[in-house]
Image (cartoon, grey):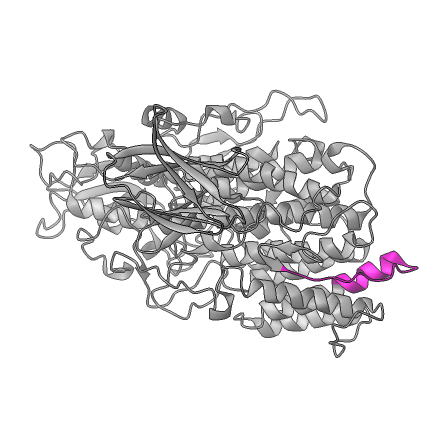
């Protein structure tokens, strides 16, 4: 069986039957199944996974002597969810089952009612619900008589209402309200000249038929940018201290701002020294690894890959060049000496590099018919939870938890992580609006080459010439054309693309020299590239955040037994073309290793350049532990305030960067003192802001540069320090 819906339904096959799972696990599986046949919207589904995790956790927590609820009876993200309490039942397990089931049935039915395959999902929800013996006609939300079914309905009703005002624009189908693309769409099949675009910004793609990575026919032939304003969505553990409100035509809420990506330079015969050109040329170079006729063999076991110290992530361009193997593929990881569970070396697994690269590109592509990256990590969590070597101890310490407690707590921690990763990443995507390889490579190839002004087709924005990878077409070249019309143009040695595949079950495109303007990512021709900007990589952020959470959740950086695996059968996995050419097993010693493999897969797949990758890993490494720590406060009963840290920001400054005026808005119920300092510590301004005041400061006298804004309360204690930049 090829990689169809069933392949991903069986991803990490559970070691237990559903009848042995908790009610939270069974509803999570229902949600994952619904995501697989919905539109591929990582932001929306990260939010669905998070909100459902809150509902299930709160239904459990109300009867626990220690734990605090997140939403029920609290003010979360500025939304108040009243709760008058309910009688503790004689059978707590039965009450929790009932509350969770009613809440999840109502919430999921609402969230997927307009999905493209809603009839299938709704029928599955109803079957699950009625198989439990519950009444779908019971819709009361009045739990005053201790009706646990009514409490479940009420909890869902409140979460639905919260979601309609959380900044997601759910009521209008999650559509963007302000964003508009700078570039005209690229009509893929026409191979048109792409040299007129702005090469630093995202370009929509135009299709005769567009099928998203979940296999759904998209309602538009030019898909819109998904989620450019998602940074405004209420987060879980992201804080106002990490937030900047930047303006590029609309207010962009950007947490953990990584700064701008690499923009194209006007090269002076040194194109490869331009980080932008090097970065996208590397994507084209790795495309040359996708030919199963290439006999290059590599060891893909944990003995040779993984185990990279995140403190060594590249920062400078020179460090990026050292980290990624431009010609050979892969990164600077060194592998593990021993499996800590067996105390034995990991056995090498030699496979064709082409098989490994193609499998990674499809496996981690999360499509077709997948759960998207946030859901993919929930399948990994469920796989780990079912592993016989796992002790369900929170953080690896303390008592072994019952299945339901383990599930609701682990889902809340992971749900908060992937949701915050989506809010963080898509806020960055919307603001920086960065180009994808399909557009950048075709743009530069349309321009020419940027290495040697004495050679044909020289242009400061052209591709760098690299022997064996990117070259000029000469007379006599098979690509020259009948009348030498292509002589002097750019050719790249890369995967030949979907034009060379008629029957994916049996055909292989292979690798050869092709016109640079005809370059394709290793993806389906009806999908090509996700419909949103590249910088930063959602895959890198989701995966690194989830890996950190899984490490903290289990108390062990290693998969149970020292290795997670996924088996693949010869010629039974790939969808884009035939393959792999041999049986093989994907292997990861640690959760971070799996995350890093995800990141590399997006380069081999032609979706992201290196600059998209590392920043995502770094942010995920922060978001994951923050979300886990936040979840732990609820587990330990520490979050007693009705105003979680993740509430809407209390201090906003915009635009950033500013020119002559800077607006400051704060929500404190007391006056604050704002003091502005130069970076050398000189105070330049002091201004008292009254309670809840919004003030616009005239700062035309300030020179261009970076400044520190410090806010003090009535006790002269600092409440916030933020950097601001004047252009």
Q: Give yes or no for residue 97 being in the magenta stretch.
A: yes
Name the residue: 53% across, 63% down: 165
Looking at the rendering, the stretch of residues picked out in magenta corresponds to 80-100
Q: Position of residue 420 (x, y in %)?
A: 54, 47
Drawn side of residue 543 relative to residue 327, left or right: right
Q: Position of residue 712 (x, y in %)?
A: 49, 36
| Residue found farthest to the right | 90
Name the residue: 54% across, 42% down: 543
Name the residue: 68% across, 69% down: 106
Drawn side of residue 301 relative to residue 23, left or right: left
Q: Give yes or no for residue 18 being in the magenta stretch.
A: no
Quadrant placement of the N terminus: bottom right
Q: Position of residue 110 (x, y in %)?
A: 61, 70
Q: Nearer the viewer, residue 610 or 578?
A: 610
Residue 473 visible here? yes
Q: Nearer the viewer, residue 582 or 329?
A: 329
Q: Position of residue 295 (x, y in %)?
A: 42, 34
Quadrant placement of the C terminus: top left
Residue 522 visible here? no
Q: Nearer the viewer, residue 84 or 203?
A: 84
Name the residue: 73% across, 55% down: 58
């Amino acid at each position: 069986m090829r990689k169809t819906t069933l392949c991903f339904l069986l991803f990490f096959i559970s070691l237990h039957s559903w009848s042995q799972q908790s009610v939270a696990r069974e509803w999570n599986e229902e949600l994952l199944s619904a995501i697989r046949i919905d539109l591929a919207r990582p932001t929306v589904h990260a939010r669905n996974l998070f909100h459902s995790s809150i509902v299930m956790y709160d239904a459990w927590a109300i009867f626990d002597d220690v734990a605090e609820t997140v939403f029920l009876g609290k003010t979360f993200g500025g939304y108040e969810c009243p709760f008058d309490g309910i009688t503790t039942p004689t059978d707590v397990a039965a009450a929790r089952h009932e509350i969770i089931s009613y809440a999840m049935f109502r919430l999921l039915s609402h969230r997927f009612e307009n999905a493209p395959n809603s009839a299938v999902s709704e029928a599955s929800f109803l079957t699950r619900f009625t198989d439990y013996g519950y009444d779908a006609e019971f819709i009361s939300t009045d739990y005053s008589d201790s009706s646990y079914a009514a409490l479940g309905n009420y909890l869902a009703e409140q979460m639905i209402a919260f979601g309609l005002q959380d900044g997601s624009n759910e009521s209008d189908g999650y559509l963007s309200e302000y964003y508009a693309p700078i570039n005209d769409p690229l009509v893929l099949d026409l191979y048109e000249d792409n040299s007129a675009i702005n090469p630093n910004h995202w370009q929509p793609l135009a299709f005769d038929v567009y099928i998203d990575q979940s296999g759904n026919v998209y309602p538009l032939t030019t898909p819109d940018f998904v989620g450019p304003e998602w940074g405004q969505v209420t987060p879980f553990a992201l804080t106002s201290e990490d937030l900047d409100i930047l303006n590029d035509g609309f207010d962009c809420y950007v947490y953990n701002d990584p700064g701008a990506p690499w923009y194209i330079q006007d090269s002076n015969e040194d194109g490869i020294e331009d980080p932008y050109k090097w970065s996208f040329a590397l994507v084209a170079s790795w495309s040359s690894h996708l030919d199963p006729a290439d006999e290059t063999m590599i060891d893909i076991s944990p003995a040779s890959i993984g185990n990279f110290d995140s403190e060594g992530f590249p920062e400078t361009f020179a460090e990026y060049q050292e980290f990624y193997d431009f010609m050979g593929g892969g990164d600077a990881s060194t592998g593990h000496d021993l499996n800590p569970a067996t105390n034995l070396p990991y056995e090498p697994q030699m496979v064709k590099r082409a098989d490994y690269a193609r499998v990674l590109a499809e496996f981690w592509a999360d499509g077709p018919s997948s759960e998207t990256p946030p859901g993919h990590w929930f399948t990994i969590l469920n796989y780990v939870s079912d592993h016989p070597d796992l002790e369900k101890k929170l953080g690896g310490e303390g008592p072994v938890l019952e299945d339901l407690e383990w599930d609701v707590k682990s889902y809340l921690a992971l749900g908060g992580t992937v949701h915050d990763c989506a809010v963080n990443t898509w806020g960055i995507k919307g603001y920086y609006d960065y180009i994808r390889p399909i557009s950048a490579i075709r743009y530069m190839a349309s321009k020419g080459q940027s290495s040697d002004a004495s050679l044909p087709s020289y242009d400061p924005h052209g591709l760098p010439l690299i022997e064996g990878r990117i070259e000029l077409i000469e007379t006599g070249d098979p690509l020259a054309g009948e009348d030498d019309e292509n002589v002097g143009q750019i050719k790249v040695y890369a995967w030949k693309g979907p034009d060379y595949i008629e029957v994916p079950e049996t055909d292989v495109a292979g690798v050869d020299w092709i016109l640079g303007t005809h370059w394709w990512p290793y993806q389906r021709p009806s999908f090509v590239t996700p419909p949103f900007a590249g910088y930063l990589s959602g895959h890198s952020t989701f995966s690194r955040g989830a890996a950190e959470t899984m490490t903290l959740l289990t108390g062990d950086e290693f998969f149970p037994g020292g290795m997670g695996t996924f088996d693949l059968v010869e010629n039974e996995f790939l969808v884009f073309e035939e393959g792999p050419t041999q049986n093989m097993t994907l292997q990861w010693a640690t959760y971070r290793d799996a995350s890093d493999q995800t990141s590399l897969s997006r380069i081999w797949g032609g979706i992201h350049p290196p600059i998209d990758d590392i920043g995502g890993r770094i942010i995920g490494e922060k978001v994951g532990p923050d979300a886990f720590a936040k979840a732990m406060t609820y587990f330990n009963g520490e979050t007693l305030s009705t105003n979680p840290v993740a509430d809407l920001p209390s201090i906003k400054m915009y635009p950033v960067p500013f020119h002559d005026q800077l607006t400051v808005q704060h929500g404190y119920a007391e006056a604050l003192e704002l003091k502005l300092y130069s970076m050398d510590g000189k105070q330049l301004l002091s201004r008292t802001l009254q309670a809840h005041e919004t003030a616009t400061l005239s700062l035309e006298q300030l020179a261009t540069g970076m400044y520190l804004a410090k806010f003090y309360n009535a006790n002269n204690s600092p409440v916030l320090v933020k950097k601001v930049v004047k252009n």
